[in-house]
Image (cartoon, helix red, strand yellow):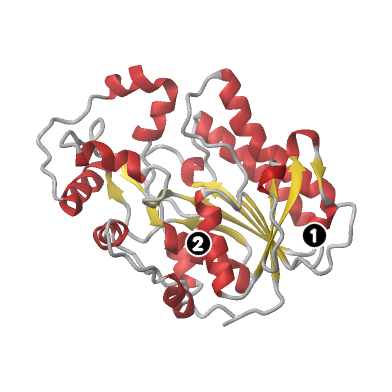
Amino acid sequence: MQKDGMKVLITGATGLVGQAIVRVLHQQNIMVNYLTTSKDKITDSKDFQGFYWNPAKDEIDMACFDGVDAIINLAGASIAQRWTSKNKEIILKSRTESLDTLYNALSKKSTHQIRSFITASAIGIYPDSLTHYYDEKETVVDDSFLGEVTEKWEASADKFNEFDFKLAKIRIGLVLSTDGGVLPRMATPVKNFVGAPLGSGEQWQSWIHIDDLAIMFTFVLENKLEGVFNGVSPNPVTNTKMTKELARVLNRPLWLPNVPKFVLSGILGKMSYLLFASQRVSSKKMEKHGFNFQFPNLGPALENLFDENRKSRTATATMKNELV
């Protein structure tokens, strides 16, 4: 259903997930305001207008809120960088300061026209486990830097419960896209005939196709959902299964033994935790609200992503989810 006249403010709109969400919103005739820390990236068109902000200094162009019905927050530095003391501070502050800046700004103006605030989070909040199957009711937080970041990220978001609009947090899993993110880095060694599972290969990877994730954000927006939701597909896989499916789709053999954990730890340092953490996460809550996954299974998802003649079916999938 088209939503002429509706407008959404997005932080992180130029990132991998942000660009995908913007495409879905525009397919629905929803206009987008976006915030950027680079004045060179500010554009001004009928349906895509940029505004400057600097969360580190709590600066924001208040005009960004004009006519806005909802806010989607995706701001945050990549977690996939060496976890030095300096980088860890950047990773954390990029998330909390962005939310704090939005909160402080909204506290100074009327928010009666805003009906939803949706923020990204991460499944890294769930404890590392080969046996647990996590849903949104889990209260134990992973004892790691990743768990710490996500917990503080969500705590900053919880302050928005003070406003009258709906607050939703989407805990994103491993986003699969050939346009960026982790998938190209996973596929490269497989393409070069040196692919292999990592460590034991038994660690669970809860993944989601980029199109499904983009549609999920708009689904939560349009259906005025609130609370915590897992942004993952219905069928998590082990790292071994992920590697084998990649090899099948790319038509490459797997002949090397598993990559020992100590090797990657030596190369990547503490950040290697991202490769070995195991979170098997449920999507049932989202499905109970009526969300239909276009790609519930890994094989077809990878086949779609690596299809050289791929034509996006995002618009069709959006209609199937009956956005209202």
The mark that comes first in sequence, 2 or 1, is 1
Q: Is residue 121 visible?
A: yes
Q: Position of residue 29 (x, y in %)?
A: 61, 75
Find residue 289 and report its horizontal and vertical position in percent: 51, 72
Count of marks overlaid on the render = 2
- Identify the residue shown where x is 10% and y is 43%: 253
44 left or right, relative to 272:
right
Dot 1 alpha-carbon crowd within 10 angstroms: few under 14, some 14 to 19, many 20 or more: many
The answer to whether 243 is drawn above or below residue 89 in the figure is below
Q: Which residue is depicted at the point 48% across and 79% down?
A: 319
Residue at image mark 2: 214
Nearest the eye: 81 or 223 = 81
Q: Residue at x 52, y 29 (%)?
A: 145
Circle 1: residue type = Phe
Q: What residue is pinned by disc 1?
A: 65
Residue 31 placement, left or right of 206: right
For the residue marked with disc 2, what is the amino acid? Ala
In x, y percent, where is residue 180?
A: 42, 46
**Which residue shows up at 71% across the image and 64% down it?**
70
Residue 226 appears left or right of 313: right
How crowded pointer 2 is (Cα within 10 Å; few <14, some 14-19, many 20+) is rated as: many
